[in-house]
Amino acid sequence: SILIIDFGSQVTQLIARRIREAGVYSEIVPFNAAAEAFERMQPKGVIFSGGPSSVMWEDAPSAPQIAFDSGVPLLGICYGQQTLHQQLGGKVVASDQKEFGRAYVEVKAPSALFDGLWQVGETHQVWMSHGDRVETLAPGFDVVATSEGAPFAIATNEDAKRFTVMFHPEVVHTPDGGKLLANFARHICGCAGDWTMASFRDAKIAEIREQVGSGRVICGLSGGVDSAVAAVLIHEAIGEQLTCVFVDHGLMRLGEAEQVVSLFRGSYNIPLVHVDASADFLGGLEGVTDPEAKRKFIGAEFINVFEAEAKKIGGADFLAQGTLYPDVIESVSFTGGPSVTIKSHHNVGGLPERMNMKLVEPLRELFKDEVRELGRELGLPEAFVDRHPFPGPGLAIRIPGEVTKERCDILRKADAIYLEEIRNAGLYDAIWQAFAVLLPVRTVGVMGDYRTYDSVCALRAVTSVDGMTADTYPFAPEFLSRVATRIVNEVAGINRVVYDYTSKPPGTIEWE
Ligand code: XMP
């Protein structure tokens, strides 16, 4: 296994992800807990992450001595590179030549780090992000690659198997970065590369059993992939100690609620409480048109309903959530200052404190596509696992203006037609998220010699890697015409269809 010592970089989890992709088990441990973790794991190699600190600060974080004394191979990235040199007797200074973003390194000498990958004399793109720089390398280190702003872009001590890079190999903007990390884990550290999602499943099951003991766990299902995968995994670990509660707010897509219920009760035989709270939600949304007011009401009502149901079944010691890594990093980011609330994202936040429960979050380290892979591993149907993300507040934020049952029904039909056409055209997997929006605008049309005066439906489809930025999906005009014709012909209440061509930023993916 590989131990990743976290010095607080925003992208530390990406290191773990790349190591997983190389088929090697790794654990991320904060720098101040790394010594114990080393004793426990006996890793075959250690990676020092980047981080926002400066090694020149008085109590700058450092790596535990045991990492050096053990003699296992080491890889220092950015801040990790600086502390590695400093701890081994090199010198780091503040630099006036800062390098951020894309840079090119020129390979000056061979190294085990890029053996079989990069040759001397070649130039390769990397992603730099650093302020300080190493002025004097630690004894035994030599430069093997340079960049314009970084004479020590890669410096290594080949005999001691210690490698330091000033750039981030873990991000996609370092195109060969994944291969460099795989080289380190497999060839330099000698890890086997046979670790898979099946191993992850087994390890997590053991971890959940240990955490939960004989306690009771309650899991709120949203209808989405993340909470479903978390629930199935936890059920595998602790069986009947788990109860799932599915709060149906009446704002789901067509057939979605039925799908969730039949999957859990039918295929998996997992105890499921299905609460049809649509009347409460729709009642409470009456007259509400402000997007934030909708979101806040739905979030609060969700907690009320969930809490009441939890009480009915006798409470629980733990609350399970399908929290993913991108959800975690935004809330714990250690460099980011206070950020502006664009939208109040809805999840079951607030519940654990209110109900005095501990959290079980088995997906915290994973990215969306890895959760999907785990879902497949657990036998969830493909059509369920590969579904596009769906926001907690559901259709309410896809109906600008007042939300009514009638408008939800209209939107559900249009949305289902749009998605059916996308699937038929084989485009579903190429798109991150596609959905219809029902606008509070009526326009005039003509249908079979009659005048119509009905609502406008907007179609949205975007590509994205993580939902943080997004690009409009460029459908062929014939495709959009076909969808528009079908929606206007088949859905009463809609007589005009438009396509949303806004990227994010400046738009957001959802309309509210
Ligand atoms: P925006 O609209 O902010 O959406 O560009 C980015 C991604 O997040 C989803 N989204 C939500 N997911 N609860 C969720 O679980 C929410 O309240 C929520 N709001 C937006 C959105 O569908 C997109 O994938």
Image (spheres, helix red, strand yellow):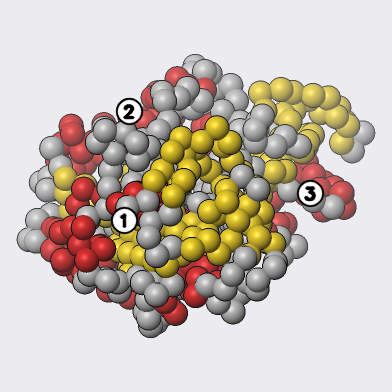
Closer to the eye: label 1 or 3: 1
For this view, does 15 lie left or right of residue 478?
left
Q: Give the quadrant of residue 358.
A: top left
Q: Which residue is mark 1?
A: 88
Residue 441 in sight here: yes
Where is residue 337? Give x, y as percent.
Answer: 41, 25
Quadrant in which the C terminus appears: top right
Q: Position of residue 301 (x, y in %)?
A: 33, 29
Residue at 52 percent across and 18 percent down: it is 290
**Label 2 vs label 1: CA separation?**
53 Å
Q: Are marks 1 and 3 in contact (CB under 8 Å)?
A: no
Relative to 303, residue 378 above or below: below
Residue 22 in the image: x percent, y percent? 46, 73
Q: Which residue is mark 2?
A: 300
Write the residue at 71% across / 22% down.
441
Is 303 in front, or is 508? 508
Q: Work out whether mark 1 precedes mark 3 in sequence or the reverse, and give the earlier one.
A: 1
Judging by the rendered image, the residue that carries numbered circle 3 is 474
What's under tag 1, amino acid-wise?
Answer: Leu
| Side (left or right) of 371 relative to 167 | left
Name which residue lies at 22% across and 66% down. 69
Q: Are marks 2 and 1 in contact (CB under 8 Å)?
A: no
User: Given the image, on which type of amino acid does mark 2 rest?
Assistant: Ala
Density class for disc 1 (Cα within 10 Å; few <14, some 14-19, many ≥20) is: some
Q: Residue furthest left?
A: 214
Foreground mark, 2 or 3, reads 3
- Identify the residue at image location x=55%, y=64%: 144
Q: Which mark is residue 225?
A: none
